[in-house]
Image (spheres, rainbow, N blue to C red):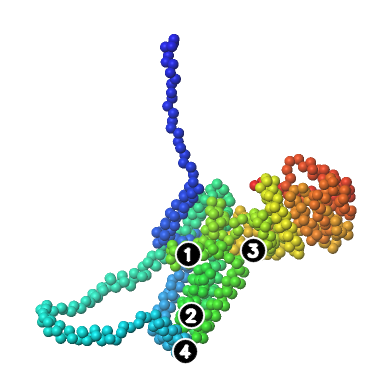
């Protein structure tokens, strides 16, 4: 070209495009699974160290109140911890000494117990059970004979025997003379060398060294936990909730106090159970009642079956001691009567019907900790899981622990109400309502649960995700529920919170979704209302034009009737422009309009109020709006 420049276009090098791999549904699950596997492996392979630490943490909750009490007496932190740990060590040493003496005494009577068991077995064989066993053995023998092969013919067997007898002399003559071995075997007697003093001491102390080492680690860790309690708490707060320092601190302190109270009550209850078992076995005459009382107290930490498992050894010993069966029956009666009494009556009075764990979680945790840590894990399974659930209810980042192991429903009462209505299951909705009404008034239930559940339904209907058939099912279901609750008074029941409820109620959510509605000041009694207000139709409950507004009007009408007002529910179709002329509003003193969902400029509401004022000029008009706080 004229300017001498090259006309070719300059091609810039392009960076290679990065191809991003498509995410599969399992990508988000891989990391939690790996972390969980690492945690389980660490718990398993580190059990020699982690078991003493877990026991020390649980013991810190038990003697923590004692340390706090001693500090209030101005003993100082370290002296208070020392006194509390020494008292605990004295208790453990005393129990260990008692168990050792009881086991030594039990071992001396084992030969006598074996003879008694053998005599009872002979008596059983001589009785009806022995005859039945012999009869079963004879039947089994006959069945075996019927299935056995037939024996071979006698002729063949005789021929074979004669042939063998004829060959024997020839074989005897043909046999060469036996060659004598000049090297005769020498018998050697092997004897163990007498152990020396060091070996003898090692043999005797080996079974004791491991428990003593574990006990030493427990007390060392316990002392450090009690001394550095505030520092450990601050580090935990730093890990799980440093963004909201005040709230996390209050939650952690509150959880620690509640866990201490809960474990103390459980320890006292199990100790009392063991004491009663020991005294009862002593009165019955079972040997070593102190041993079985301690064993029963420990086994009662095992959920569901611990107390009954602890009865097996005393029953076997009673059978071995008493030639008859009276002692066995008395021992069985003691456990059969005492365990249901404690589990079904005393425990609910102290800390509710459960520990806040779902039954499935209790079973799974028992199996899991037993697999990890053996018998010690079985004893610690419930306390450890309770600690995890309490952390989940007080710490946001650990809320999944409460969802996995807690006994609270996965859905809120409002969500559960809506889900049951959507599934056309009014019976379960009524069952949930009965459970909530045991601690709430009817008006509180309608306001905090039913209306909010209907708000969710109204929001879904506005978004177009509910079909007409589903709306019909919800309307029919709520009408049936309101009718089923018509015999209930609008009063708050008197309930007392249990220890489990106080222990496991988190700072975010409470166990009960509603509270008792306060009494209206200067409210007249139903019989003291004027006659004009008690007449039917004195209060017209008009439904808005939403698909579920009539249900809200029905709830309002029912509550007003329980307080002595005469009401009548008016559907939205009866107050439209074409039908309002036929509305019978004579004697109406008040008109209540209910709306669950209303948006934009409610011009139709203004015109509706005007029509109602013209139809009932002497009535007051009240509009109730319950819009959803946040659309889903």
Q: CA distance from mark 1 to mark 4?
A: 42 Å
Mark 2 sits on what residue?
315
Residue found 36% across the figure and 68% down from its top:
209
Nearest to N terminus: mark 2 or mark 1: 2
Left or right of 322 on screen, residue 631: right
Choose mark 3 or mark 2, whichever is in front. 2
Q: CA distance from mark 4 to mark 3?
A: 57 Å
Q: Secondary structure at mark 2?
A: helix
Q: Are marks 2 and 1 in contact (CB under 8 Å)?
A: no
Nearest to N terminus: mark 4 or mark 3: 4
Q: Nearer the viewer, residue 586 or 86?
A: 586
Q: CA distance from mark 2 to mark 4?
A: 22 Å
Left or right of 620 on screen, residue 94: left
The mark found on residue 307 in the picture is none
Q: CA distance from mark 2 to mark 1?
A: 26 Å
Mark 4 sits on what residue?
127
Residue found 30% across the figure and 84% down from its top:
153
Q: Are marks 3 and 2 in contact (CB under 8 Å)?
A: no
The 10 Å Cα crowd at callout 2, few under 14, some 14 to 19, many 20 or more, is some
The 10 Å Cα crowd at callout 3, few under 14, some 14 to 19, many 20 or more, is few
Q: CA distance from mark 3 to mark 2?
A: 39 Å
Nearest to N terminus: mark 2 or mark 4: 4
Nearest to N terminus: mark 1 or mark 3: 1
Choose mark 1 or mark 3, whichever is in front. 1
Viewer can see residue 537 = yes
Residue found 48% across the figure and 51% down from its top:
32
Mark 3 sits on what residue?
497
Mark 1 sits on what residue?
367
Residue found 55% across the figure and 77% down from its top:
336
- Coordinates of residue 360 in the picture (x, y in percent): 54, 63
């Amino acid at each position: 070209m004229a300017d001498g420049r090259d006309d070719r276009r300059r091609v810039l090098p392009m960076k290679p495009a990065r191809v991003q791999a498509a995410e599969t549904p399992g990508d988000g699950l891989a990391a939690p699974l790996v972390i969980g596997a690492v945690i389980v492996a660490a718990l398993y392979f580190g059990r020699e160290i982690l078991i003493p630490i877990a026991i020390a943490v649980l013991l810190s909750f038990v003697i923590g109140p004692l340390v706090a009490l001693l500090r209030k007496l101005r003993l100082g932190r370290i002296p208070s911890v020392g006194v509390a740990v020494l008292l605990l060590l004295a208790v453990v040493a005393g129990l260990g000494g008692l168990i050792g003496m009881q086991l030594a005494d039990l071992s001396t009577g084992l030969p006598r117990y074996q003879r008694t068991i053998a005599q009872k077995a002979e008596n059983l064989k001589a009785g009806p059970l022995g005859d039945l066993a012999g009869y079963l053995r004879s039947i089994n023998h006959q069945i075996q004979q019927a299935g056995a092969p037939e024996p071979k013919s006698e002729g063949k067997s005789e021929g074979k025997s004669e042939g063998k007898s004829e060959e024997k002399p020839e074989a005897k003559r043909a046999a060469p003379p036996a060659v004598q071995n000049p090297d005769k075997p020498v018998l050697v007697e092997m004897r163990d060398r007498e152990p020396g003093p060091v070996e003898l001491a090692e043999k005797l102390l080996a079974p004791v060294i491991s428990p003593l080492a574990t006990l030493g680690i427990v007390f060392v860790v316990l002392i450090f936990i009690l001394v550095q309690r505030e520092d450990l708490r601050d580090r935990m707060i730093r890990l799980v909730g440093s963004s909201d320092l005040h709230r996390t601190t209050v939650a952690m302190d509150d959880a620690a106090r509640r866990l201490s109270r809960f474990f103390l009550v459980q320890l006292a209850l199990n100790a009392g159970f063991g004491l009663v078992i020991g005294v009862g076995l002593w009165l019955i005459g079972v040997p070593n009642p102190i041993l079985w009382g301690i064993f029963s107290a420990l086994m009662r930490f095992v959920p569901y079956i611990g107390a009954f498992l602890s009865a097996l050894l005393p029953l076997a010993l009673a059978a071995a001691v008493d030639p008859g069966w009276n002692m066995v029956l008395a021992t069985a009666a003691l456990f059969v009567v005492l365990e249901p009494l404690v589990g079904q009556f005393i425990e609910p009075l102290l800390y509710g019907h459960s520990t806040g764990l779902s039954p499935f979680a209790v079973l799974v945790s028992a199996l899991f900790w037993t697999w990890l840590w053996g018998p010690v894990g079985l004893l610690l399974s419930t306390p450890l899981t309770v600690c995890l659930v309490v952390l989940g209810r007080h710490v946001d980042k650990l809320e999944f622990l409460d969802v996995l192991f807690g006994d609270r429903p996965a859905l809120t009462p409002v969500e559960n109400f809506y889900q049951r209505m959507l599934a056309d299951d009014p019976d379960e909705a009524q069952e949930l309502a009965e459970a909530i009404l045991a601690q709430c008034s009817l008006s509180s239930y309608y306001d905090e649960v039913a209306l909010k559940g209907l708000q969710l339904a109204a929001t879904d209907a506005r978004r177009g995700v509910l079909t007409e058939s589903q709306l019909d099912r919800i309307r029919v279901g709520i009408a049936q529920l309101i009718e089923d609750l018509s015999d209930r008074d609008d009063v708050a029941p008197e309930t007392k919170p249990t220890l489990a409820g106080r222990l496991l109620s988190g700072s975010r959510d409470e166990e009960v979704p509603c509270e008792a509605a306060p009494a209206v000041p200067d409210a007249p009694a139903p019989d003291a209302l004027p006659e004009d207000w008690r007449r039917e139709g004195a209060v017209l409950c008009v439904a808005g034009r939403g698909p579920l507004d009539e249900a809200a009007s029905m709830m309002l009408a029912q509550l007003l009737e329980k307080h002595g007002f005469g009401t009548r529910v008016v559907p939205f179709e009866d107050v439209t422009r074409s039908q309002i002329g036929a509305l019978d509003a004579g004697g109406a003193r008040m008109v209540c309009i209910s709306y669950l969902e209303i948006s934009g400029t409610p011009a139709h509401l203004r015109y509706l109020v005007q029509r109602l004022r013209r139809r009932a000029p002497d009535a007051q008009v009240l509009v109730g709006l319950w819009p959803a706080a946040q659309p889903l």
